[in-house]
Image (cartoon, helix red, strand yellow):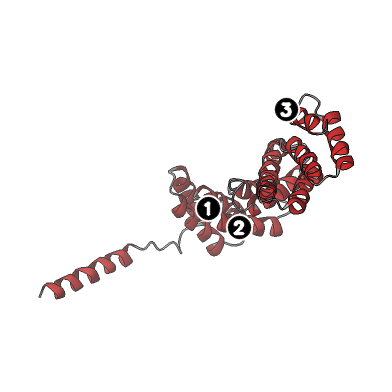
Amino acid sequence: MKKILLVLSAVLVLSACAAKKEDTSMLSAETLYTKAHRRLQKGQYEKAATYFEKVEMEHPYSKWAVKAKLMGAYAYYKDAKYDDALMSLDRFIKYHPASKDIDYAYYMRAICWYDQINPSDKDQTASKNAYRALNDVVTLFENTDYAADAKAKMNLALEHEAAQEMNIARFYLNGKNYLSALNRFDEVIQKYQTTVHIEEALYREVEIYTILGLNDNARKMAEVLNYNYPDSSWNKKAQNLIK
């Protein structure tokens, strides 16, 4: 008897949920958009995204549909659903390149990647994608506030990439795999010259060349380090190595 009552209760609950499902087919695009915006302001990001999607689907040719596409992406972003946000933004950029909000769409796409950047000991795919997306903002919208912010964030993305290369290089160095370490440090020197890791990378090459007995190479790298960073603690260590 208890089992029957439990089953009946479950059916009633499901029926009630189904009955509460909102029918929006008769609502105007503006009404749906307003509902979505109110949910967004209340922090109900998932519900807001759902309403914005309804604007797109039920009123695809209205002026609200274009706005909803971008705001839906923002709602997904606030809900940390980055893949959904990126899909919406890519669609907006593809189909509305002349929109007055196109710069914001590019910027939001970059921020979606930027917010996913991992610590340097984790995968750096997001930092690479963030750098490329941020560079698009700087290149395409150079005189905007978005570009100014993107430039600052590009530096941090590079720092993360360089830090990962340094971690791998140090791992090889500690394991006495000197050639592999040298290649990784050289990668930092060639690609990440504006990061804080450049000084150590130069020193490590001096160190490795010294270990390998390639003293001429060690001196050349020490000269580069001394010329560019004369006051660096890494430079002082390098000069002591080649004495």
Q: Are marks 1 and 2 in contact (CB under 8 Å)?
A: yes
Please name whichever residue, 198 or 7, is drawn nearer the observer in this view of the structure.
198
Check whether the beta carbons of the residues at disc 3 and disc 1 lie within 8 A of each other: no
Mark 1 or mark 2: name the one nearer the start of the chain. Answer: 1
Q: Amino acid at mark 3?
A: Ser
Q: Position of residue 54 (x, y in %)?
A: 50, 60
Residue 65, picture quadrant:
bottom right
Question: Does residue 183 lie above or below 149 as drawn?
Answer: below
> In which quarter of the view is residue 82 placed?
bottom right
Check the image and name the residue furthest to the left: 1
Tell me which numbered mark, 3 or 1, is placed earlier along the sequence.
Answer: 1
10 Å neighbourhood of mark 2: few (<14), some, or many (≥20)?
Answer: many
**Left or right: residue 88 compared with residue 16:** right
Residue 76: mark in rendering:
1
Q: Earlier in the sequence, mark 3 or mark 2?
A: 2
Kindly identify the residue that appears in the image at 70 percent across and 41 percent down: 154
Residue at image mark 3: 233
Residue 100 spot, x, y in % from top left = 70, 46
Which residue is pictured at 69% across the width and 59% down the height? 95
Give the spatial CA distance, label 3 vs label 2.
48 Å
Which of the image's four quarters has the C terminus?
top right
Instruction: Kindly identify which residue carries mark 2.
Output: 88
Q: Residues within 10 Å of mark 3 (few under 14, many from 20)?
A: few
Question: Could you give the CA–CA distance between mark 1 and mark 2, rounded to whole angstroms?
Answer: 9 Å
Q: Position of residue 56 (x, y in %)?
A: 56, 60
Cα distance in 3D space between marks 3 and 1: 46 Å
